[in-house]
Amino acid sequence: MGHSHSHNHSHSHPSLRGKNLLISILLNILITVSQIIGGLVSGSLSLLSDALHNFSDVLSLVVSYIATLLAKKEASINRTFGYKRAEILAAFVNASTLIIIAVLLIIEAAKRFQDPQKIESNIVIWLSLLGILANGFSVLLLRKDAKTNMNMRSAYLHLMTDMLASVAVLIGGLIMKFYQVYWIDALLTMAIALYLIFVGYDLLKESFKVLMLFTPGDIHVKDIVNRLNAIESIKNTHHVHVWQLNEDEVHLEAHIDFHKDLNLSQFDLILNDIEEILHHEFHINHVNIQPEFGKCDAKDVIVQD
């Protein structure tokens, strides 16, 4: 049995990610409280929807923060992978909440379309400006980590949509102030909700695939099998599993038939070649190979366990 580990440490340090998340949480609490009070006083549904979205961000950022802390915990006898999947689970939960909140906002906006109400636009304008500034700062804090970490990307998307929603609310507030077009409030709420569904769906699908141990989209199992079978000493590669554990780790396990009955030192030399091929050509950094010679088992590439 051969087993290999290869790690990439180019990502930002978890403690820095945690600090940036904590700052974003505090900023979003400030925005949420302000917008709830302002929405109730002004009667603005779009401001309340923005506040509700911000509140979901507080919850999602807390989930992301806890996941970041858990991801740093070491593996143990009872948790051999540690909490490496905590951040993927957080991304799935956050994407789900985005979509659920969006549906609720659409329902409420449809009701408001039928009965537009006069809104105190000055409150809407000033609180939307607060949301733009605070969320914009949070977006800048998380931007770098969002490129390499699914959990941070989910938090980043929450904050980015919040900032864009606040921009929309600001525009609506200005229209209501100068033109008294109050149905624009419900229209903006619906637009914000549809955008939440749009950005949430991709992240939900991506995190779901990782949690379900699906093969990463950029890896083709048949290409791997053909490449390994091209090695002179290998007769057949079968019973293959490829999955993504988290952002940093892609695993492969496979059974390999050899033409000859090799000893361990010979197998180790071939295993080194296999590891190099999988790492450099397919970006797989955890390899687990079961060597076989003349064994009667299913030789299909994919075998149902």
Image (cartoon, rainbow, N blue to C red):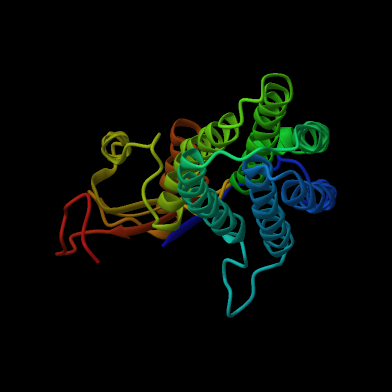
Residue drawn at x 22%, y 53% is 302
| Left or right of residue 8: residue 85 | left
* Residue at (70, 48) in percent of width and height: 51
Q: Position of residue 33 (x, y in %)?
A: 80, 54
Between 157 and 130, which is closer to the camera in this rendering? Answer: 130
Give coordinates of residue 240: x percent, y percent.
30, 52
**Left of 272 or right of it: where is 174?**
right
Name the residue at 69% across, 54% down.
55
| Residue 250, placed above or below residue 195 | below
On the question of residue 268 being in view, the answer is no
Q: Is residue 102 above or below residue 265?
A: above
Res 167 → quadrant = top right
Q: Nearer the viewer, residue 227 or 187?
A: 187
- The residue that appears at 83% across and 47% down in the rendered structure is 27
The spot of residue 36 in percent (x, y) is 74, 52
- Image quadrant holding the C terminus, namely bottom left
Q: Nearer the viewer, residue 240 or 263?
A: 240
**Res 267 visible:** yes
In which image quadrant can residue 122 be found? top right
